[in-house]
Amino acid sequence: MGSATTQARTATTEALASTSGVDLDVARELFAAVAAVSGSAQLSGALSDSSVPPAVRAGLVSAVFGPSYQPTTVALLSSAAQQRWSNSGQFIEGLEELAVQATSVAEPADIEAELFAFSRTVASNGELELALGGRLGGATAKGDLVSKLLDGRTSAGTALIVSSLVKHARGRRVRALLRRAERIVSDQRSRIVATVYAAAPLSDDQQARLQNSLSARYGSAVTLNTVIDPTVLGGLRVQVADDVIDASVSARLADLRQRIAG
């Protein structure tokens, strides 16, 4: 990712943080704008063209989205369009990130946990992953499928994120989209996500102690996503980004076998 895009993402995130009145309707409009911009090479090119003055790009946003979108949504889109992006593809990804962040602001529920749970469901069901991410089936049908799967089971914010990403995957795998959305929400809420692999569910006391330990280690609030994995045998394997803490029985046995063989 180019430095221009990094700076643009930071500026867009700061614009969202300083904007009041962000609700799920604004988030829906932002996702709709992502679909509109990604579906038009001419529009995405014009809005991300750094040779065009920022005020002109902001004016184009107002002309295209102003008549039908809320002022808050138009202001956020204008702020994003006025930044300098490395290319149109990264501009579209920046808008998508903004839409996910806006959903996180508007939705108080634990979106990270809900996204993780749904991603595990997708990972365990090949037919479902194909139905959501395959080339067959239109965007509307995929969105309807997500609505049926999540209705009453997740918050409105999570359902909005999943359905929007699935309907406009742009060739990306569903699980990758869900993981990216989960990271965006965690970053926006200043949380660290730890994936915990255990042979059996953790008790409330075990979860609390593990969270406290990881929070002290990483200096930030930590959200636990637990995966039940019988191959762990006992103990825990914890992954935070690229950092792996393996205190599982299976790892100890593997280490013991290696020492005996060596």
Image: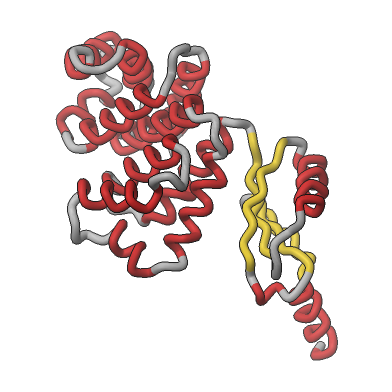
x, y percent for residue 91: 33, 31
Nearer to me, 261 or 102: 102
Q: Is residue 149 visible?
A: yes
Q: Is residue 84 left or right of residue 48?
A: right
x, y percent for residue 195: 64, 55
In the displayed structure, would residue 122 be above or below residue 24?
below
**Which quarter of the figure is the N terminus placed in?**
top left
| Residue under the point 59% across and 31% down | 189
Q: Is residue 112 left or right of residue 243?
A: left
| Residue under the point 46% across and 16% down | 15
Nearer to me, 194 or 234: 234
x, y percent for residue 187: 57, 35
x, y percent for residue 10: 50, 25
**Which quarter of the figure is the C terminus placed in?**
bottom right
| Residue under the point 47% across and 19% down | 16
Classify residue 162 by image quadrant: top left
Nearer to me, 153 or 198: 153
| Residue under the point 45% across and 64% down | 123
In the displayed structure, would residue 256 be above or below residue 180?
below
